[in-house]
């Protein structure tokens, strides 16, 4: 008896929807992720094979966009497989061909019939072609796929391997092995080297699991990677423990780039190390380096501050920034309303000079400076306190990875006709500065707020202008925090990683959900919840600790010994 096909009667549609769902989750698009999830659930309940995406329109949660995506993907799949147009079964069942999902049309509950001799010969003729394609796939040296396979193989043979690499880890490990950038879209191209990972997943050479994504080699991928390593042009394997990185000439697409005077330097040159006064720990290799004179400090404005609502008032902010000659960029920020980035100086292409101020060049790399501003008018502050966003926003600002959060309160005197008394609002601002450690700046109106942002932009340009900026991940930043702008160099987050990590509705760990649950208890602040999590990571561990207490008095005093805050009380 032949085995039933996996994935139901429509395995290709199921696989594509799952891939799109995972991509939406990885890119921080919860609405798209939910749409694909609902479409998958509806497809699993449908017992018949579908000939095209247009036919799936009859199913619940299949809109025009998803059906059009399926038809486009189906057409690409046919061209890749060199398959002819499928012949739809006639009512009598005399003429039969492959459906778009490569399954015969069956009635619900029917099992796959034994193929007829003509069908068996047709299948046997197709199998060697597919087999030759799978066996013959071999990525070109120093291509994106080649670098990804080599980096995953290098990790798999390491004694300290976890069995997988996350996307940032895999990008950093594969970049030295590839001539194309994994982080930035180069001029004349529409994608980075990272796009090769979808090809490896489709060919079942790389396995993608979990959210956030984890990547590992399949058995076929491991075998292919071993052949690549053993070939005439072996992959230069790096040491398991990071060693002082070697200077690389700029313009090769590799990370990190150096200035022109460093081209041809000896391999003994290393990146600047912090002058922290203590023992110097060996630092991981940065993703890239921006040296003094190679970047501009640019103000990033959340698009919510310039669109929607009273357009006259929001346009006034843009006009004020233009009037003050502030270089700024309007984009979507997942946390805060304003922040500053160090943008690499890249010569704009012809016709882009006018758009360069509000839209960064495609190839410009950016690092986020350690300052973020949350702007509130008094009615907004009152509303956020009432609906609970006030504490949540402050908690997210503390967790975003930037050291200097600023609370910009505009028009603090306009407290008439608000739902909360003036004393409550003043106390909230005082707590934000004294207890939470934010810098609270009060301005009279929007023009004064724009003036403050102008002064901050110029001050940060002076502060960071003579520093060497090293790009790193959030995990590395947490362990290497002593290296700040007071020294000759500092480690900063890339804007893409910062904004991706600040997504509000991203997939959360059990500990993160537990922290949010604790903060719903009256009197439990973010600091208290964090202190509880240091001792009890999950609800199960806390319940187990309560169960282990022999007396009711012991349960009441279980959390009394936990200290939190600056005073450790």
Image (cartoon, rainbow, N blue to C red):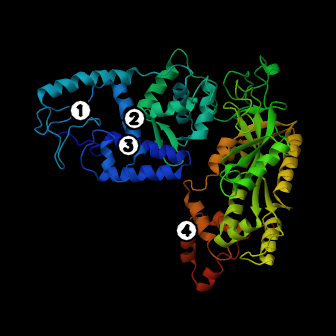
Badge 3 element: helix
- In the rendered structure, which disc, 1 or 2, sits on the residue that comes first in sequence? 2
Quarter of the image holding residue 557?
bottom right
- Is residue 480 among the parts visible in the rendering? no
Residue at numbered disc 3: 67
Q: Nearer the viewer, residue 101 or 153?
A: 101
Q: Residue at x 57, y 29 (%)?
A: 190
Residue at numbered disc 1: 98
Say if mark 3 contacts mark 2, CB within 8 Å.
no
Q: Nearer the viewer, residue 232 or 188?
A: 188
The local crowd at label 4, few if under 14, some if 14 to 19, many if 20 or more residues have their Cα within 10 Å, is some
Image position of 19 with respect to 526: above or below: above
- In the rendered structure, which disc, 1 or 3, sits on the residue that comes first in sequence? 3
Residue 62: x percent and y percent?
Answer: 37, 49
- In the rendered structure, which disc, 1 or 4, sits on the residue that comes first in sequence? 1
Say if mark 1 contacts mark 2, CB within 8 Å.
no
Residue 394: x percent and y percent?
Answer: 72, 62
Image position of 452 with respect to 86: above or below: below
Residue 182: x percent and y percent?
Answer: 61, 31
Image position of 191 with respect to 328: above or below: above
The local crowd at label 3, few if under 14, some if 14 to 19, many if 20 or more residues have their Cα within 10 Å, is some
Tell me the quadrant of the picture where the C terminus can be found.
bottom right
Badge 4 element: helix
Badge 2 element: helix
Residue at numbered disc 2: 73
482 displayed left or right of 20 = right
């Amino acid at each position: 008896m032949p085995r039933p096909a996996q994935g139901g009667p429509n395995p290709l549609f199921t696989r594509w929807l799952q891939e799109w769902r995972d991509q939406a989750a990885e890119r921080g698009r919860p609405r798209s992720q939910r749409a694909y999830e609902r479409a998958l659930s509806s497809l699993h309940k449908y017992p018949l094979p579908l000939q095209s995406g247009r036919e799936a329109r009859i199913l619940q949660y299949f809109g025009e966009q998803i059906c059009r995506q399926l038809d486009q993907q189906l057409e690409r799949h046919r061209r890749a497989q060199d398959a002819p147009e499928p012949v739809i079964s006639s009512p009598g069942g005399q003429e039969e061909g492959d459906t778009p999902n490569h399954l015969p049309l069956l009635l619900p509950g029917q099992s796959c019939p034994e193929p007829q001799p003509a069908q068996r010969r047709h299948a046997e003729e197709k199998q060697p072609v597919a087999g030759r394609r799978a066996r013959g796939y071999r990525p070109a040296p120093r291509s994106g796929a080649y670098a990804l396979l080599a980096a995953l193989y290098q990790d798999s043979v390491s004694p300290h391997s976890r069995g997988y690499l996350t996307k940032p880890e895999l990008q950093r490990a594969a970049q030295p092995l590839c001539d194309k950038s994994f982080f930035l879209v180069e001029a004349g191209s529409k994608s980075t080297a990272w796009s090769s990972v979808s090809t490896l997943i489709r060919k079942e050479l790389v396995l993608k699991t979990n959210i956030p994504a984890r990547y590992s080699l399949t058995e076929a991928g491991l075998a292919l990677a071993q052949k690549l390593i053993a070939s005439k042009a072996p992959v230069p394997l790096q040491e398991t423990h990071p060693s002082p990185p070697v200077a690389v000439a700029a313009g090769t697409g590799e990370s990190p780039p150096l200035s022109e005077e460093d081209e041809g330097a000896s391999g003994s040159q290393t990146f600047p190390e912090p002058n922290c006064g203590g023992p110097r720990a060996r630092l991981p290799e940065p993703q890239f380096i921006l040296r003094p004179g190679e970047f501009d400090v640019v103000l990033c404005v959340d698009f919510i501050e310039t669109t929607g609502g009273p357009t006259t008032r929001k346009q006034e902010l843009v006009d004020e920034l233009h009037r003050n000659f502030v270089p700024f960029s309007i984009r979507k920020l997942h946390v805060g309303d304003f922040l500053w980035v160090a943008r690499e100086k890249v010569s704009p292409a012809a016709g882009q000079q006018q758009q360069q101020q509000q839209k960064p060049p495609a190839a410009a790399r950016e690092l986020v400076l350690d300052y973020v501003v949350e702007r509130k008018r008094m009615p907004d502050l009152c509303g956020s306190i009432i609906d609970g966003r006030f504490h949540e926003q402050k908690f997210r600002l503390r967790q975003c990875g930037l050291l200097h959060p600023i609370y910009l309160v505009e028009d603090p005197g306009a407290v008439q006709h608000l739902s909360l008394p003036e004393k409550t609002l003043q106390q909230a601002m005082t707590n934000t500065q004294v207890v939470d450690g934010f810098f609270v700046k009060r301005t009279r109106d929007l023009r004064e707020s724009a003036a403050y942002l102008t002064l901050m932009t110029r001050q940060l340009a002076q502060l960071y202008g003579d520093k060497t900026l090293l790009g790193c991940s959030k995990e590395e930043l947490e362990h290497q925090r002593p290296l700040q702008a007071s020294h000759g160099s500092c480690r900063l987050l890339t804007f893409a990683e910062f904004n991706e990590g600040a997504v509000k509705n991203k997939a959360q760990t059990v500990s993160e959900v537990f922290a949010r649950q604790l903060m719903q208890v009256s009197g439990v602040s973010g600091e208290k919840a964090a202190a509880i999590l240091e001792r009890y990571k999950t609800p199960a561990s806390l319940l187990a600790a309560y169960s282990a207490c022999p007396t009711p008095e012991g349960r009441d005093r279980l959390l009394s010994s936990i200290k939190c805050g600056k005073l450790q009380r």
